[in-house]
Image (spheres, grey):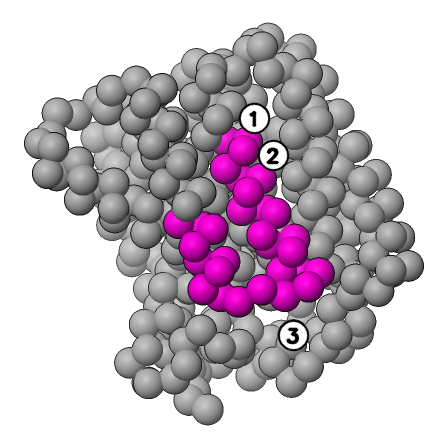
């Protein structure tokens, strides 16, 4: 694909997303699809929810003009599976659905994605035993399902989920595009562009929320792009783990602490670091978002170094852990984790 096609696609995705989000917001207000603040919320005013569906539609529409450039595995893995996750998220946004039913759909989508990769995709760039393949597939399915849910957990502050995805898919998409100029990289960059259009409406103070429909399909696609990029183009999954660091570190650490504290880990709470900065340290949404952007920028630098100098990739992973641990230790001092 040419750079001209990339520019046209990215610009179209941005403009279409910004328009569709505004249009959806109008419909959501009109039909009462709004988030009502409660004691667990980080917001104080009624706000339309489910705006992530507009990003999904914009991404699919613009991508569809270039489907002839995609391989069958890229189409099957990226689009139907993510749309299934988005569909159950949209239903949950509008009508509510049990966590167990959502989990079944997430695991099913992950299983279909991996089955498609094994059937249609290229062989893995490593040779391992069949038993280890089964174990790896099982663990990967759980990891994908966790990615879907952790992204949902972390979507609780104006702009934070959108900016996280812009960093991940923008830099990750650049890695793929730089190496191959393939449709996969093009698709990731399109996604980053649609989320930039969404951010126009979601930046503090947010005029619309992403909802489970948006956070779910983004969490799924982080895993999908990382796995396909590794299997098809030999781009290390580690660079995606680095880019995703802020979200998986906060979500995983918070989950473990709540489990060890014998709390209902699946219940709504305000224990994440970004929530504590807002509710305990009294930081504004804009201040929390600006610090998240700084953290993501540093992680982006680590990922870039690891991509261009793969002999330093292990060091970059270590630095990511150290950097996040130091950052979250500092947050603990000004906004400590507290039990109910």
The answer to whether marks 1 and 2 mark residues whose Cβ atoms lie closer than 8 Å is yes
Return the residue nearer the eye: 105 or 64.
105
Q: Which residue bears the numbered disc 2?
A: 191
| Membership of 99 in magenta stretch | yes
As rendered, which of 7 and 318 lies closer to the eye?
A: 7
Find numbered disc 3 in the image and state the secondary structure of the residue it sits on: loop
Q: Is residue 249 above or below residue 272?
A: above
**Residue 155 falls left or right of residue 223:** right
- Residue at the (84%, 64%) spot, across then down: 32
Question: Residue 148 at x, y = what percent?
Answer: 47, 52
- Give the mark, 3 or 2, whose residue is nearer the N terminus: 3
Residues shaded magenta: 78-107
Near mark 2 (Cα within 10 A), the count class, few <14, some 14-19 or many ≥20, is many
Residue lying farthest to the bottom in this orientation: 340
What is the C-alpha distance between the residues marked 3 and 2?
26 Å
Q: Which residue is mark 3?
A: 42
Q: Position of residue 214 (x, y in %)?
A: 62, 49
Q: Residues within 10 Å of mark 1 (few under 14, many from 20)?
A: many
- At which x and y percent is residue 93? 67, 60
Q: Residue 210 vs residue 256: left or right?
A: right
Q: Main secondary structure of the magenta part?
A: helix
Observer able to see residue 242: no
Q: Nearer the viewer, residue 252 or 101?
A: 101
Residue 27 in sight here: yes
For the N terminus, give its image quadrant. top right
Does 162 sit above or below residue 75?
A: below
**In percent of the image, x 17 and y 25: which residue is there?**
126
């Amino acid at each position: 694909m040419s750079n001209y096609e990339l520019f046209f696609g990215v610009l179209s995705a941005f403009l279409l997303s910004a328009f569709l989000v505004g249009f959806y917001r109008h419909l959501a207000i009109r039909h009462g699809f709004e988030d009502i603040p409660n004691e667990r919320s980080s917001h104080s005013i009624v706000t339309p929810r489910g705006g992530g569906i507009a990003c999904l539609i914009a991404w699919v529409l613009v991508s569809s003009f270039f489907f002839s450039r995609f391989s069958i595995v890229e189409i099957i893995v990226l689009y139907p599976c993510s749309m299934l996750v988005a569909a159950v998220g949209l239903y949950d946004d509008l009508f509510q659905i049990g966590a167990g039913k959502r989990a079944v759909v997430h695991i099913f989508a992950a299983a279909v994605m991996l089955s498609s990769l094994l059937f249609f995709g290229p062989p893995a760039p490593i040779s391992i035993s069949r038993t280890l393949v089964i174990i790896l597939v099982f663990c990967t399915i759980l990891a994908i399902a966790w990615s879907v849910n952790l992204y949902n957990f972390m979507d609780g502050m104006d702009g934070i989920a959108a900016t996280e995805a812009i960093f991940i898919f923008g830099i990750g998409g650049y890695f793929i595009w730089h190496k191959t100029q393939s449709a996969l990289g093009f698709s990731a960059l399109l996604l980053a562009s649609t989320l930039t259009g969404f951010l126009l409406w979601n930046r503090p103070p947010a005029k619309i929320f992403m909802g489970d429909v948006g956070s779910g399909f983004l969490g799924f696609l982080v895993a999908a792009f990382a796995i396909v990029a590794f299997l098809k183009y030999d781009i290390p999954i580690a660079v995606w783990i680095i880019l995703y660091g802020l979200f998986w570190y906060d979500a995983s650490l918070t989950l473990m602490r709540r489990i060890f504290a014998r709390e209902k880990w699946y219940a709504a709470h305000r224990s994440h670091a970004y929530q504590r900065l807002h509710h305990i340290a009294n930081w504004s949404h804009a201040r929390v978002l600006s610090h998240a952007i700084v953290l993501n920028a540093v992680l982006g630098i680590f990922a870039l170094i690891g991509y261009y100098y793969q002999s330093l990739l292990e060091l970059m992973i270590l630095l990511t852990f150290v950097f996040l641990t130091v950052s979250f230790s500092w947050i603990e001092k000004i906004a400590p984790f507290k039990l109910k």
